[in-house]
Amino acid sequence: MSGIVGYGTYIPKYRLKLSEIAGMWGKDAAEIEGGLRISEKAVAGFDEDAVTMAIEASRKALASSGLRSSALQSIYFGSESHPYAVNPSSTIVGEYLGVGNNYFAADLEFACKAGTAGMQMTVGLLDSKKIEYGLAIGSDTAQGKPHDALEYTAASTAVAYILGNKKSEIIANILEMSSFTSDTPDFWRREGAKFPSHFGRFTGEPAYFTHVLSEGEKLLKQSKLKPKDFAYCVFHMPNGKFPRAAAKKLGFTPEQLAPSLTVDKIGNPYSASSLLGLAAVLDIAKPKQKIFFVSYGSGAGSDGFIFETTLNLPKYQKKTIPVAKQIEDKIYISYQQYLRQGHLL
């Protein structure tokens, strides 16, 4: 059985309050914050991108796990904001980490579930005994066009998971894994376009909820488990309302969901969103607890996992910087600074 042996997260210090954006465009900040259930979002620095953030997250994962970078035999990098259209992000990360040359590598794009797609690919290599350790990354410096609805939620964060198959090292076993996929283009960005486009409210019922709920129901049926069997649940968080609604419809309680809701204070960092929620849960979980997890990516699809924590987790938790602590380590910036740091001016 394969599972998680290490994880690392990187959240930029800069924060932009939604009231700053609303004030710039003459909108009602209270109405927007109440509708999205988000108060502020994380913003990458002027000299940061998806790769630099991924390197920081990966270094933390390696340090906490105690593994040498040369032990990694695969790197799958999921993002919507790869710095280069042609030139892989995964190999840059591998070079900076000092992985060597003997590893599988690929850049992945499947909107906000590219990072979880990387986890699935890594599990496949582990279960087929092709590798012993693999790195799966979700990292984005997400952007929304100024004065677009996405501008209020698009955020920046990186999360890296090291997966392995040695029982003595695994902190969370993967009990189940599946996906639900369709051609539902609710969100897209054409080649050469700087900002993504979307169908507005269309992204709700036929896109997010159809896929998340379908995958969630399938995962419960496949595992023969019920919501009450889980200590926590984690969903992709495009805003603060959707994951709460999805959890309720599947039968989970607010208490099972609450620890994963990083979106309220840092926004939606796309490929890192659900993975950050999982990290926040692993920061506080106890051994032998089950975690229900469903990601979502526009286009569209959801990846589902059922994790069960092990007796190795408490010792590992002492080596990490909790997500909650990183969220509170922040510097507020103005809307003008946000435009400059995002290279929008």
Image (cartoon, helix red, strand yellow):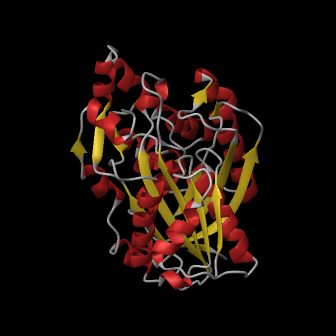
Quadrant for the N terminus in the image: bottom right
Badge count: 0
In front of the other: 294 or 10: 10
- On the picture, is 307 further left or further right than 313? right
Q: Position of residue 195 (x, y in %)?
A: 53, 33
Residue plotted at (28% across, 50% down): 13
Q: Position of residue 140 (x, y in %)?
A: 49, 49
Q: In the image, what residue occupies the spot 61% across and 44% down?
A: 111
Please state if 279 lies on the left or on the right of 197 as rendered: left
Residue positioned 44% across, 50% down in the render: 260
The foreground one among 309 and 123 is 123
Which quadrant of the figure has residue 283? bottom left
Please indicate, yes or no, whether residue 229 appears anywhere in the rendered image: no
Which quadrant does the C terminus fall into?
Answer: top left
Q: In this image, 106 relative to 257: left or right? A: right
Q: Where is residue 184 shown, x and y percent of the image?
A: 73, 33
Q: Is residue 132 above or below residue 93?
A: below
Give percent across and percent down for residue 42: 35, 44
Q: Nearer the viewer, residue 270 or 108?
A: 108
| Residue at left offset 43%, top offset 34% | 153
The image quarter containing residue 36 is: top left
Relative depth, front residue between 312 and 7: 7
Note whether residue 287 is visible: yes
